[in-house]
Image (spheres, rainbow, N blue to C red):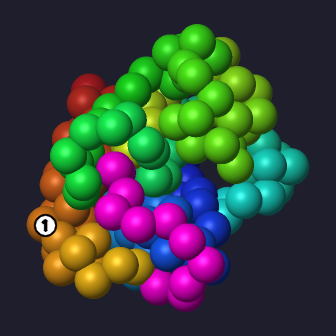
Amino acid sequence: MLVMGIGNVLMQDDGIGVYLTQELMAENTDGQIRFEIGETDVDYCLAQVEENEFLIIIDAVQCRGEKGSLYVFELTELGRMEKGIAAHNYHLFHALSKKQGILIGIEPYEIGFHFGLSAELNGRFPFIKEKVSELIHNIAAAKCK
């Protein structure tokens, strides 16, 4: 199973997928889970995905919901989503829409030219990390059965 963090760390909360994946990777003890930081490099991201590998993407998504909310989408749904959900990853999402896996999306508070997360999302980071970690490990346990 591959967990890939994508986003732009120079655009404030857009980098949440990268920051979460970095921390989860550092804490990972499960040899069945691989982690990659894809940032915004679509070609790199596509090259990391093995043929029949289950893929979990972590990224900021704008669904016009409550800031800091978590969403889970099947990758097969991504080809039908509107372009605005994560504009920098539109091509990536559509390229991966035939793969088995999920997108874990986090609703950003602020996206703008700034390094690091907004104060609000940074304050929710531990809670979000815990929920994302639980989801990943539950999926990994189910895939091993």
Nearest to the observer: residue 27 or residue 120: 120
Q: Which residues are magenta?
A: 106-116
> For the C terminus, which image quadrant?
top left
Q: Is residue 66 above or below residue 14?
A: above
**What residue sits right under mark 1 in the picture?**
127
Is residue 76 shown left or right of residue 144?
A: right
Residue name at image x 21 percent, y 62 percent? 128
Residue with the most extreme right position: 43
Q: Nearer the viewer, residue 28 or 114?
A: 114
Choose top left, top right, bottom left or bottom right for residue 28: bottom left
Residue 108 visible (yes or no): yes
> Left or right: 46 with respect to 9?
right
Q: x, y (%) of residue 103?
A: 45, 37
Q: Residue at the location (44% across, 31% down)?
A: 102
Q: Which secondary structure is most common in the magenta stretch?
A: loop
Seen at 34% across and 50% down, the residue is 107
Secondary element under disc 1, as helix, strand or loop, is helix
In the depicted structure, whether residue 58 falls above or below residue 12: above
On screen, residue 20 versus residue 83, left or right, reads left
Please state the horizontal and vertical placement of residue 118, each as a whole percent of the image.
35, 79
Residue 116 position, x and y percent, is 47, 85
Residue at the spot 45% in from the left edge and 45% down from the top edge: 61
Q: Amino acid at mark 1?
A: Phe
Label 1: few (<14), some (14–19) or many (≥20) C-alpha neighbours in 10 Å: few
